[in-house]
Each structure stands twice: as C-alpha cells, then as structure tokens.
Amino acid sequence: MTNNTTNRRREISKEYKERRQLGGVYTITNTVNGRYIIGHTADLAGIRNRFQFSVTTGSTVDHRLRADWQTLGGQAFRLDILEELEQQPDQSNADFMADLQALEQLLRANLDAAKAY
C-alpha cells in the first residue's frame, strides 16, 4: 500500500469519526386506524431507509406493528419525523442518546397514549 493510500484512509476514518450525527424523534403511524409507535434514533437517515426497505419488501419495520402490517401492508403506514437534533461537537454518544430519549418523552406527552401500539 502506498503512503498516499494510507493517508487517505486515515483522513476518511477521521472525517467519519468527527461527523455530526443527525438524530431525532419519529412516529410510525397506521393511517387506517391512527395507532402509532414513537421512537428516537441517533441516525434519522437510517430509520428512513429501514422504513422504506420494509415498505418495499413487505417486512415489518417493528414487531409491535406486525399484525396490522401483515393485514394492511406497508403502504398503510407513514413515517413522520417529529423533531431533529444534531449532536454537538463536544457531546458524547451517551449524552446525545440521553437527550434524544428526553426529547421523545416530551413529545410523547403530546400524543394520545390510547392510540399507541
């Protein structure tokens, strides 16, 4: 391996480790009956991709939705991002996840608990 290749790999690795994560709180809602799940993630792009993959392949994105997903199909569900939160440069992953969890709890209070899966 050349020195340039090694240096470039180090640069890519450093950039990856230093990137800021965009997390947030989301709901997946059954558009037929209004039932939902709420969750938080440090990777909003990942949850969007996972949801789209589940809709496309017919696989359930969350076990709590399985019965309705199999009956109605993935097209009967929608993913909504309720709030986005960017990880701060000096914030640890654990602190970021704690902030996301607290944000989820705040937003959960605004939802009808009777419609939660």
Image (cartoon, rainbow, N blue to C red):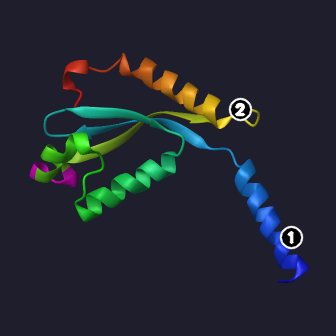
Magenta-tinted stretch: 71-75
Does any portion of residue 87 appear in the rendered image?
Answer: no
Circle 2 residue: 91
Residue at 22% across, 60% down: 58
Residue 7 occupies quadrant: bottom right
Q: How many neighbours does mark 2 have within 10 angstroms: few (below 14), some (14-19), or many (20 or more)? A: few
Q: Look at the image and say whether residue 72 sits in the magenta stretch.
A: yes
State the image coordinates of residue 73 (x, y, percent, origin top left). 16, 54
Q: How many neighbours does mark 1 have within 10 angstroms: few (below 14), some (14-19), or many (20 or more)? A: few
State the image coordinates of residue 14 (x, y, percent, origin top left). 78, 56
Residue 90 occupies quadrant: top right
- Helix, strand or loop at label 1? It is helix
Circle 1 residue: 7
At label 2, the amino acid type is: Gln
Q: Is residue 73 or residue 90 the one in the foreground?
A: 90
Q: Look at the image and say whether residue 102 sits in the magenta stretch.
A: no
- Helix, strand or loop at label 2? It is loop
Which one is earlier in the sequence, the residue at label 2 or at label 1? 1
User: Which secondary structure dominates the residues rendered in magenta?
Assistant: helix
